[in-house]
């Protein structure tokens, strides 16, 4: 561990993320957790979706999903992965 870093600083933490253009092409995990207050980090995942567009005026996300609507829950986990289609 780096000098001055505490053990709790290295733990995975949940933070709210608001829609922004930086989310476009990012992959999100769809959690089976019923609410963010649930034990999200230990809940199973339903799968993954990709954000294809962000509408800042309406604060909505357009996603690419392998499943038809609706998503099982509203808890989405943001990853560092991006998907860029070449076509």
Image (cartoon, rainbow, N blue to C red):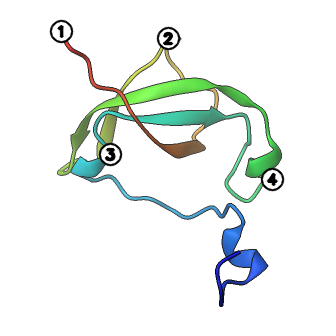
Category of crowding for the residue at label 4, using alpha-carbon neighbours closer than 10 angstroms: few (below 14), some (14–19), many (at least 20): few
Instruction: Please identify, in this view, whether the residue under mark 1 or under mark 3 is nearer the observer.
Output: 1
Which residue does the numbered mark 3 point to in the structure image?
23
Instruction: Please identify, in this view, whether the residue under mark 1 or under mark 2 is nearer the observer.
Output: 1
- Label 1 SS: loop
- In this rendering, position of residue 57 left or right of residue 38: left
Disc 3 or 4, which lies upstream in sequence? 3
Question: Which percent across, then down, holds residue 86?
Answer: 20, 14
Which residue does the numbered mark 4 point to in the structure image?
39
Disc 3 or 2, which lies upstream in sequence? 3
Please tell me in which quadrant of the rendered image residue 33 appears.
top right
Q: Which mark is residue 12?
A: none
Q: Which residue lies at the image location 25% right of the left edge and 41% below the top edge?
A: 54
Q: CA distance from mark 1 to mark 2?
A: 18 Å
Q: Which residue lies at the image location 73% right of the left edge and 83% below the top edge?
A: 6
Disc 4 or 2, which lies upstream in sequence? 4
Which residue does the numbered mark 1 point to in the structure image?
87
Category of crowding for the residue at label 1, using alpha-carbon neighbours closer than 10 angstroms: few (below 14), some (14–19), many (at least 20): few
Disc 1 or 3, which lies upstream in sequence? 3
Which residue does the numbered mark 2 point to in the structure image?
66
Q: Check if mark 1's residue and mark 3's residue have beta carbons within 8 Å.
A: no
- In this rendering, position of residue 77 left or right of residue 56: right
Q: CA distance from mark 1 to mark 4?
A: 39 Å
Question: Which percent across, then down, holds residue 7?
Answer: 77, 77
Q: Check if mark 1's residue and mark 4's residue have beta carbons within 8 Å.
A: no
Q: Check if mark 4's residue and mark 2's residue have beta carbons within 8 Å.
A: no
């Amino acid at each position: 561990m780096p000098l001055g870093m505490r053990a709790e600083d290295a733990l995975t933490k949940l933070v709210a993320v608001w829609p922004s253009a930086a989310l476009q092409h990012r992959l999100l995990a769809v959690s089976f957790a019923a609410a963010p207050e649930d034990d999200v980090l230990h809940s199973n995942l339903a799968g993954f979706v990709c954000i294809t567009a962000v509408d800042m005026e309406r604060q909505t996300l357009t996603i690419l999903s392998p499943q038809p609507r609706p998503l099982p829950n509203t808890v989405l986990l943001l990853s560092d992965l991006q998907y860029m289609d070449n076509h």
